């Protein structure tokens, strides 16, 4: 059975959630409505309708309009604080009922098409740590950093509120340290690392199952919309689905033709769909191989020969060149 996924033009984004939060915040910064909504196809009278949905492409355009028309560097973090538990009752109730971190992450992943439609969560257990990796779902391009900042803030702040404690997360960002690093420190605290191989947040596994002593404030009423009808939607976007397929089938050295066939389409159609989502096959395949190489070297202690064989390189020299291109590091530097 072909993988299931949503696309850039799938109407899955509830207008009174992400769009409403972004528009309300942007209006506090005096961004004119015509600049805010330009080319989005969004109308202000629709954003608070519980039955109205837009597609990821419209949401991305809205974010681009906001970042283009303000010099403020705290908007992504402020949006993050407002996002969760959200305004959709069936989802927010499940998030709020979490009794430990593991249950919270379960709920976030289950409902990520609604909670984080533009970048998806890939949950992994690596050694003694839980790691949440951020995956591009639909081709976020220049908005990816904004989204990572917002959702990292959203999860860490909700977990802090529900647990009534500041959890010792480690935060990893693939971009270089920005000029506004103080925003990261204010909204995320310490343990922030830049120029990393992946965008992720990690925590010691022991914190996943510690029962939470709920904050008394949590019993207060939270505004949720019980009239919202949740649409049926896949849990991940097209790009995340392709990544997961390649990651799961790396042993067979998957190529474009076989991947397209397993997605139920011709190679030409598959390439067009990848282009529509601002990507191409080799870019995703290289990302998968890079991530696996880094994991096998750092977490499993594999030799260069073992990694080369598992990634279908003819020899270590070819792996060495590819790894340098992917990461900017030598294999020796990656081990250290």
Image: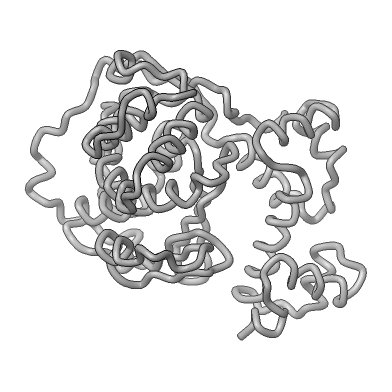
When asked about the image quadrant of residue 139, the answer is: top right
Rendered-image quadrant of the N terminus: top right
Percent position of residue 134, x then y? 51, 51
Residue 121 lies, with reference to residue 310, above or below; the image says above
Looking at the image, which is closer to me, 74 or 34?
34
Percent position of residue 8, x then y? 58, 29
Residue at the (72%, 30%) spot, across then down:
273
Label tally: 0
Instruction: Answer left or right for 288 relative to 118.
Output: right
Residue 41 lies, with reference to residue 302, above or below; the image says above
Instruction: Answer left or right for 267 relative to 163.
Output: right
Residue at the (15%, 33%) spot, across then down:
222
Instruction: Answer left or right for 270 relative to 112.
Output: right
Percent position of residue 209, x then y? 33, 59
Residue at the (31%, 18%) spot, across then down:
44
Q: How is the image coloured?
A: one colour
Percent position of residue 290, x then y? 69, 63
Residue at the (79%, 68%) spot, across then down:
322
Rendered-image quadrant of the C terminus: bottom right
Instruction: Decide if residue 93 is in sight here.
Output: no
Looking at the image, which is closer to me, 149 or 89?
149
Instruction: Decide if residue 271 is in sight here.
Output: yes
* Residue at the extreme right of the image, as rendered: 314
């Amino acid at each position: 059975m072909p993988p299931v996924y949503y696309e850039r033009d799938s109407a899955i984004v509830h207008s009174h959630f992400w769009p409403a939060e972004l528009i309300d915040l942007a209006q506090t910064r005096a961004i004119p409505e015509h600049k805010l909504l330009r080319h989005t196809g969004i109308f202000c009278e629709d954003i608070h309708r519980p039955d109205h949905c837009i597609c990821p492409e419209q949401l991305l355009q809205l974010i681009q309009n906001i970042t283009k028309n303000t010099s403020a560097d705290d908007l992504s973090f402020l949006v993050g604080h407002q996002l969760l538990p959200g305004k959709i009752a069936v989802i927010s109730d499940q998030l709020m009922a979490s009794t430990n971190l593991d249950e919270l992450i379960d709920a976030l992943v289950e409902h990520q098409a609604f909670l984080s439609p533009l970048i998806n969560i890939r949950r992994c257990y690596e050694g003694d740590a839980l790691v949440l990796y951020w995956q591009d779902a639909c081709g976020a391009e220049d908005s990816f950093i904004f989204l990572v900042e917002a959702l990292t803030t959203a999860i860490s702040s909700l977990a802090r509120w529900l647990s009534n404690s500041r959890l010792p997360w480690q935060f990893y960002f693939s971009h270089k340290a920005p000029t506004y690093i103080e925003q990261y420190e204010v909204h995320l605290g310490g343990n922030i690392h830049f120029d990393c191989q992946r965008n992720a947040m990690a925590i010691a596994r022991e914190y996943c199952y510690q029962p939470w002593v709920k904050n008394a404030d949590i019993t207060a009423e939270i505004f949720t919309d019980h009239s919202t009808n949740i649409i049926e939607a896949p849990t991940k976007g097209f790009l995340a689905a392709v990544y997961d397929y390649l990651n799961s089938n790396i042993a067979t050295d998957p190529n474009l033709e076989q991947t397209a066939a397993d997605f139920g389409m011709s190679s030409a159609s598959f390439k067009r769909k990848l282009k529509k989502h601002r990507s191409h096959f080799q870019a995703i395949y290289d990302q998968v191989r890079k991530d696996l190489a880094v994991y096998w070297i750092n977490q499993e202690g594999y030799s260069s020969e073992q990694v080369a064989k598992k990634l279908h390189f003819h020899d270590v020299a070819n792996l060495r060149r590819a790894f340098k291109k992917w990461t900017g590091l030598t294999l020796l530097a990656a081990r250290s």
